[in-house]
Amino acid sequence: MSGFALLLIALAVPQPDLLGDGQRAFSRGDLDRAEALFREHVRQFPGSAEGWSNLAAVHARRGQFAEAVPLYQRALKADPKLTQVHFNLAVSLGQLKRYADAAAHLRVFLKSYPNEARARQLLGLCLMESGDPRGALEELEKSYRLNPNDGSILYALAYVHARGGDENQAAAYLAKTESNPVQAKLIEGLLLYRRGMWAEAKEVFSEVVRRKPDFQPAVAALGRLELLERNDPAAIALLERAIDLNPQDAESTYQLGVLYDRNGDSERGKKLLQRAASLRAGYGDPHYQLGRIYQREGDLKKAVEELELARKLLPEQEAVRMALGRVYQAMGRAAQAKAEFDEVRRLKARVVERDRLRVESDTLMKEGPENP
Amino acid sequence: MRVLVAFLLAACAAWGQGIASRGVKPQAKPKASGIPWHAKFTNVAKEAGLVQVLHYGGEEKSDYVLETSSGGVAIFDYDNDGLPDIFLVVGSKINNPPADAVSRLYRNLGGLKFEDVTKKAGLWREPGWAQGVAIGDYNNDGCMDLFVTYWGDNALYRNNCDGTFTDVAEQAGLLPVPRPKVPRWGAGATFVDIDRDGFLDLYVSNYIDFDLEKTPKPGENPNCNWKGVPVSCGPRGLKTARHWLYRNRGDGTFEDISAKAGIARFDKSFGMTATAFDIDEDGWQDIYNACDSTPSLLFRNNGDLTFTEEGIERGIALNDDGMEQAGMGLGIGDVNLDGRLDIFKTHFADDTHVLYVNDGKGTFRDITLKAGIGVETRRVGWGTGIYDFDHDGLPDIFIGTGCVYPETEAALPAYPYKTRPMLFRNLGDARFELLEEEAGPAMLERHSVRGAAFGDLDNDGDIDIVLWNRNDTPSLLRNDLGAQGRNWVQLQLVGAKSNRAAIGARAVLEYGGRKQAKAVLSQASFYSANDPRLHFGLGEAAKARVTIYWPGGGAEQFDIEKVNTFLTLREGSGQAPQR
C-alpha cells in the first residue's frame, strides 16, 4: 500500500508549500500533520486533483479505506487523466472487498501502464474474488512474466490455482518459492486453512513454528486455529505469545480480546478490543465485538456507538448490520432497524449470487473456450 | 511483499460448500444431572413390518445434491380406525432405479404391526425423486389427504375415504402448465388456512433451481468439496429457487397466488422444511420456512391474502451471530413452558442446532448456548421434534442425524456417514442435557437419518418415533416408558368453522402450575408430518385446562378432568376462555 501511495505523492504538482509540506510530513509518517496540510490545500484549491488524491492516500495509509475511496473519486472527478489514481483507488476498493469495482479501475490503469506487474497481480486477485478464475489466471500469469522475481506473484498464482482446481500447478508454484521456504510453508498452511482442512493446516503451522519458534505469523495462525477449535486455553497461550513477539499485531490482540470475553473476563476482553482498534485504524471487527458485549450488558448507547463505527468501517458485513439492527430495534428505533435488516437481506442474497457465479465460471473454465 | 500478502489474505473469502458449515466447535459439556430417565427407545421396525428399503441415490457416493436430501415421513390415521398409520417417501437412483423404489403406506394393524398397503391404496407410482410430505384435509371430508413434493411433479393424494387415494395434483391446478424444461424441486410444504375460510391453502417451498445436466459432478469443479474431499455440488453455488402459495377455492381446485401474496419475489433462498402456525398470535396463520445456507423465511400473514417477510426482524432467519445456517429440520413446541411456541432448527456439522424462544410478542431469541444445545456439533441434524418423552411435564428435543455425503467418511473419519440420534432432556428453565445410552438401545444405533415423525403408534400414551434412514430400512423407535406415576393426555382437535383437521390450531394446556403450548402442524421435523393428535406429558398433574386457538379465529376452553386418555375436542363445544 505505502509504495503506491508514495508513487502518487511523487506525482503531485508542487503547490505553494501546503502540498510539499504535506508530502514531507507523509514521508516521515506524520499523518495527522499531512492530513491537516492537504485539507487546507483542498480548502484553498477545491479543484486540485493532487490535493484530494494525497488526502485520500493519508486515509489509505491509516487503513481508512472507506474514507479514502470518495476522496480518490473526487480526485478523478477533478482530473480524469490522473491515471495513477485509478490504481490507488482500486487498492482501497479491494480492501473493502469491492472486487468488481476495483477490477474496473485496474483495467483503466493498465491501459496506460500495461507492464505494471503489481497492478496485473491485483487485478488477478480481484477477478478471482468476483467469480472469474480464468481471467484471474490470465492476469496473474502475465504479471509473473513481467516480474518473475516477485515471490508474492507466485503465492497468488498458487492460491488461484488451488482455488481454480489445478492442485499440481498450485504445488508447482509453491515449490518455486524456495527462496523463502518458511514463508512458503506459511502460505501452504493458510491455503489448507482456507479450504477447511484445519488439522492439516495445524500440522503445517506447527512445523513452521518448530523450524522457527519465533516466527510470529505462524504462532498467531496456530492460535487462531486453536480458537476456532474452541481449545481456548491453548489459543490464549499462543495468542499471548504472538502478542509478546509483536505487540503491534492488531489481529492477535483482537482475537485474544474475544477469547478473554468468551472465557468470562469481559473487562480484560474489552480493553484488548479497544487496543486492537487503536492499533489498526479502520479495523472494524473490534468495534463489532465491543458492540456485541455492550449489547449483552444492556448498555445500548455504547453498543450503538461501537456498532455504528463498525458499520462505517465494514459497511458490507452482514453480521454488523444485523447486530446494529437488533440494537436499534431494542431502542425502539424501528425505521433504522428496518433499514439495517433490509441491508442484511441484500448482502446475503449477493453472497449467494456470487457463489453461483463462481461455480458457473469455474465450470466454464474447465470446459474451455471450445465448448463454452 | 508483506503488503501484497496482506492483500491476498484479505482477499480470501470464506467459502462454505455443501449444506452450510460454519466451523463451530462444541461448547463444554456440563456434569451429568444424574436424574433418572425412564423413556427407553428400542428399534422394532423389522418386527413391525417396516422392511422396505428407502432407496435414495448412490449408496457409496452421490454425484448430485439431489441424491442426498429427502426423507418425508408422515404419521396419520388415513382410515380413521383410531390407529396411526405411516407413510414414507422413497426416491430413485440416477441410473437404473430399482422397481420397488416407491413411496410406501403402512397400515397400522394394532400391536405395533404394520401392513404395506401402497398398491391397495392406489399410491403406487413410477420411481421418482420424492422429497417431503404434508398432511391436511383440504376438502374437509373428514379423511386426511397427503401432499408429496418431488423433484418433478408434486402429488396431491386425495383420500377417497375408502382406503384409497387418487393423485389429483393436475386437476387441482397444482402442477405448472406447460411443464418447465427443468423440473421444479418441491421441498418443504405445508397446508395452511391463510384466509380463515375453513379451507386449507398450500405453501410449497423449492430447494434449488436444479438442472441435472448443467450441475458439475464432484471433482469437476473445485468448489464442490467439503473439507477438501470432492462431494456433490450445492446448494451454494447453484441457483436459488422461489416458493409457491396456492389458495384453495373450496371446490377442490387451487389458484396460484404466489405473486400477489408477496411470496414469489423471495427467490434468493434454498427452501427446506415448511411449517405454519400463528407465530405472532394475531389470529392469522403465518408460514415459516427453514432455508439451507440462506436466511430462513418468516412470511407473516397480513390478513388480506398478502404476506410480509419478517424472518430477520423477528429473529428466526439467522443465528445469534447473524449467520445463516443449514436450516433443515424444525421442531415446534414450548420448551420454557410460557404458553408460547418456540422453534428448534437443525443444522449441518461444525455448527450448533439452534433454539429460538418466543418472547410472546412474535419475536424470538437464540438461546442455544444458554440452553446447552451446543455440546455436540459433529453430527448433521435433520428430523427433529419437541415432545415430552418421559411425561415429566417438560418437553424434550429429539434429533435424527446422519452425514450428507457417504463418500467423505474414509478421508474424514471424525465425520462418519451413519451417526447416532440425539436426545436432549429438558431439565427445566429451558436448560437441556444430552442423553446417550440412558435413553435405550436405539440411541446407540447408527443410521443416516433424514426425516423423522413423532406419534403414539401403539396408543399407549407415550411418543414413538419413525426415522427415515437413507438407503436403509426405516427405524421404529418404540418408547417403553411405562407409567412411572406420571400422567399424559392426547387431544384430537376437530374443526367446524375452521378446517376439519384443525391444522394450525394452537393449544395452551395448563397443568400442575405449568403452561405449555403445542400446535397441530401439517409439516414439521424434516419434510415430515407428525401425529396430529397433540400429546402432553403432565408429570403428576391429574387434571388440566386447555385453551384452543382455532385457525379459523376465536378461542375456546376445555376442562380436562380425566388424564391418561385420548380426548376429541370439537370446535364449538368448548367454553369462552376465562382469564
Image (cartoon, rainbow, N blue to C red):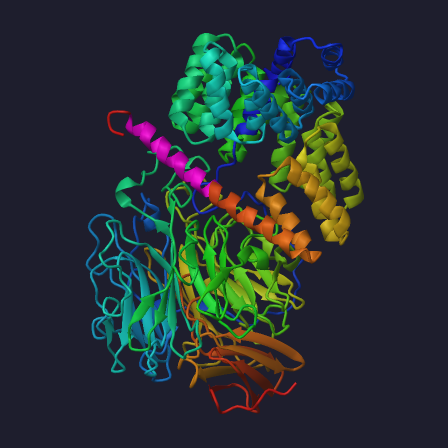
Image vertical order of residue B18 relative to residue B517, above or below: above
Residue B504 percent coordinates (x, y): 47, 74
Q: How many marks?
A: 0
**In the image, B398: left or right of B2?**
left
Residue A213 percent coordinates (x, y): 67, 21
Name the one closer to the observer, A248 or B28.
A248
Name the one closer to the observer, B208 or B408.
B208
Residue A12, by quadrant, is: top right
Can I make out residue A176 in this image? Answer: no
Residue B38 percent coordinates (x, y): 56, 72
Q: The magenta stretch spans which residues?
A: A351-368
Residue at 74% across / 37% down in the picture?
Answer: A273
Give the quarter of the figure containing the N terminus of chain B: top right
Image vertical order of residue A30 relative to residue A342, above or below: above
Residue A284, by quadrant, is: top right
Image vertical order of residue B368 relative to residue A155, above or below: below
Residue at 50% across / 48% down in the picture?
Answer: B349
**In the image, B149: left or right of A163?**
left
**In the image, B325: left or right of A235?**
left
Q: Is residue B221 magenta?
A: no
Residue B198, by quadrant, is: bottom left
Image vertical order of residue B522 relative to residue A316, above or below: below
**In the image, B315: left or right of B97?**
right
Can I make out residue B182 in this image? Answer: yes
Residue A339 percent coordinates (x, y): 59, 50
Give the quarter of the figure containing the C terminus of chain B: bottom right
- Majority SS type along the magenta span: helix
